[in-house]
Image (cartoon, rainbow, N blue to C red):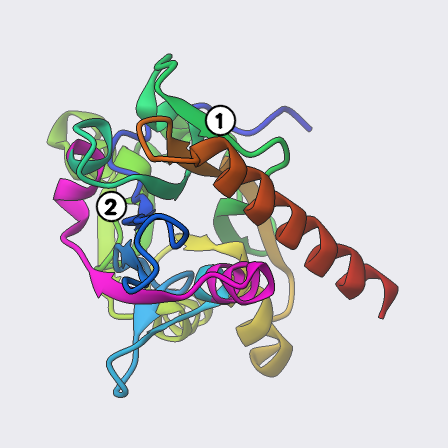
Amino acid sequence: MSNALKLHPNSLFLLFIFIVPVWSHADEPLTWGYGHFPPYLYIQEDGKPHGPYADIVKGIFKHAGIEYKSLLAPNRRLRKMMTSGLIDFAVSPKYNLGESTSFYYSRAKVATIDLRVYWIGENPVITKASDLNNQSVIMISSYEYSGLRNYIENPDNNVDLAVDVEDHERALLALSLKRGTYLLAYRAPVDLIQLEMNIQELNSFPLIQTDMYLIINKSVKNSRQIMDKLETSYSTLNANKLNN
């Protein structure tokens, strides 16, 4: 089967951490600024960030012995704040910051965002955005889908937005009830929900697969040492998971 579709994901969220190195400002914990991007990162009733990306950040900072506090930042401002130097650390795709030499990137990816198109039965396989032309699609209202929503909502492309629901569970239910032919959703939550729903003949194809990296601004004091320490913590924690 062909490789995943390469789109222009300018709208893809960034997850950011505002950094003040603890060894230069010992009384100030690091401030983690993050964007709201469920199911990977979201706020619960306790007012704290949760989700798999929050777990990554919490784990590596705890292992590295670096104190931090969290701060919710507007999604639309995150990229600008990173490139302008107002934010010093991010979990992000490399391409979101262009070809800049102003940042250190982790050597290994720390996560992958897997956006897929789902369908039931023997419907035609969707491998690219234009395959959705003249088809009905179920979407989740809180997502821009890395720019794919703009394509679907453009009347020139003749895609029928069948229903816009609140979350993955409602989206899968809508698909099972045939309210639309195709569903755009993220693999991680779908896999969990499918364990309970067990929708028969549920098929999928990856449209966008994006690797995420730790990124730190070189203008931060001791930025190379900070990155090395966080990378070591991530590698150690990941190795422990594989051995358990």
Q: Secondary structure at mark 1?
A: loop
- What residue do we see at 47% from left, 61% from top? 66
Residue 108: image x %, image y %? 63, 36
Q: Nearer the viewer, residue 126 or 101?
A: 101
Q: Residue at x 36, y 35 (%)?
A: 221
Question: Can residue 113 be found in the magenta stretch?
Answer: no
Q: Which residue is mark 2?
A: 144
Q: Which residue is more in the foreground, 134 or 116? A: 116
Which percent across, then down, holds residue 31?
A: 28, 59
Residue bearing mark 1: 5
Question: Secondary structure beneath disc 2?
Answer: loop
Amino acid type, callout 2: Glu
Give the residue type that dot 1 points to.
Leu
Range covered by the magenta-colored residues: 55-80
Q: Establish if 174 lies above or below 61.
A: below
Residue 50: image tag: none
Q: Quadrant of the C terminus?
A: bottom right
Residue 73 lies in magenta, yes or no? yes
In this rendering, the answer to whether 48 lies above or below 55 is below
Residue 139: horizontal and vertical position, in percent?
Answer: 30, 55
Residue 217 pos. (x, y %): 35, 31
